Amino acid sequence: MSATEYGVFLPNASGGWLISESAPYPPASYDYNRRVAVLGEQIGLDFVMAMAKWRGFGGTTDHWGETLESVTMMAGIAEATSRVKIWATIHANMQNPAFAAKVFATLQQVSGGRAGMNIVNGSYIDEFEQMGIWDPDMTHAERYRMTEEWTRLVLRLWTEDSVTEEGEFFTLRDCQSRPHPTPLPELISAGRSESGRAFQARYADGAFLAAESLQEMAAYSRDVHERAASQGRTVRTYSMLTVVLGETDAAAAERAASYAAGIDRAALANMRRSWGWDAQRALSWATDAEGEEAFQTPYVTGSPATVVERIRELVTGAELDGLMLIFPDYLEDMPLFGETVLPALRTTPDGSASS
């Protein structure tokens, strides 16, 4: 079995991943994200990833009100690093496959072969309505058919000298995109639906999964692994996790409670509404939401020893190949994680190196 991979989800949108008035507020600045990425490489992480986001959610924190474009930022970070994988995000519903193929072929050269393309197809309505490109009549199944056609065309453009195809969603005529990237960028995809997992198994090198329980996550991970294997492919499965460290378990729990106490309910409501919820339903949900909803992902709290134990339980229990990590205060938390947690995760409980 290959070693578990650990990476960091860069905070290229203001506020990072905690929707809270009382949490640290990472700025949407290249300098900050570059420092986080370089630090991630220094402490021994395997990859850095940035999302694509085009509109924030307001509220008292103006959550994600300022953002940096993913691919452009990651090209700079590729120059600032030498080892970590560079995973940038692009919207299939927003960018033509010929544009995407060229952009990531360029990023592959800039990064020296470390590039990955995280393919998303749009889930927050507001950011695309503002551009006039949201199709409210497109079903979930149609959105994945579009994404599959888009991905197939990108792969053809990366490997063929000329591509002509009149598809359901895109038309290319003697379309050329050279030089071809060598090696091909890794393809990354997040999703948990039947359509999402089928897409991951067919095309992705890395699949990000979310679930309501450890058992459900393990079932999704097994499903993607088995689907891929039936097609002669290998896909690595990942999930996201926020890490709240403290000198003691009590200190870490106190940190998490303080962030939960500052939950920005207006931003939460706007986020749900942008997902497609009715405005009144979104407001009612946010009004009653527990403070832990300030965390956008599952999270663990504790001393370094406790965090090591909980991460091991998660990776093993959910049958994952890796985790993408989020930190409340990246520049303060990551050095401690790199000193006390990551080395332990790189070894088995009996002290031998993991493989």
Image (tube, helix red, strand yellow):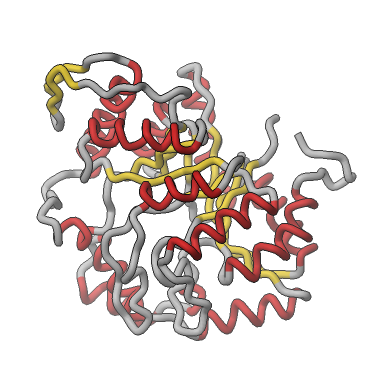
Q: Is residue 104 left or right of residue 253?
A: left
Horizontal side of residue 30 vs 175, given as left or right: right
Q: Position of residue 350 (x, y in %)?
A: 89, 44
The vertical placement of 20 against 242, above or below, is below
**x%, y% of residue 343?**
78, 51
Image quadrant for the N terminus?
Answer: top right
Residue at horizontal 30%, vertical 31%?
101
* Front residue (pair 241, 334): 334
Total label count? Answer: 0
Left or right placement of residue 35 versus residue 30 in this view: right
Name the quadrant containing residue 200. Answer: top left
Determine the residue positioned at 30% across, 32% down: 102
Q: Which residue ends up furthest to the top in the rendered image?
A: 161
- Considering every residue shown, the one lying at the far right of the view is 350
Q: Nearer the viewer, residue 163 or 305?
A: 163
When the figure is inspected, residue 203 is found, relative to residue 263, above or below; the finding is: above
Q: Can you say which quadrant of the picture contains the C terminus?
A: top right
Relative to 22, is 99 on the left or the right?
left
Q: Does residue 219 show up?
A: no
Kindly identify the residue that appears in the image at 22 percent across and 21 percent down: 176
Residue drawn where x is 75% and y is 49% of the image: 345
Q: In the image shown, does 288 or 101 lie closer to the viewer?
A: 101
Give how far across and how far down residue 195 sits, in percent.
Answer: 33, 37
Whole-percent x, y for residue 132 in the image: 10, 55
Name the image quarter holding residue 97. Answer: top left
Vertical relation: 122 (above or below) 270: above
For residue 5, what is the image quadrant? top right
Is there any visible trace of residue 21 in the rendered image?
yes
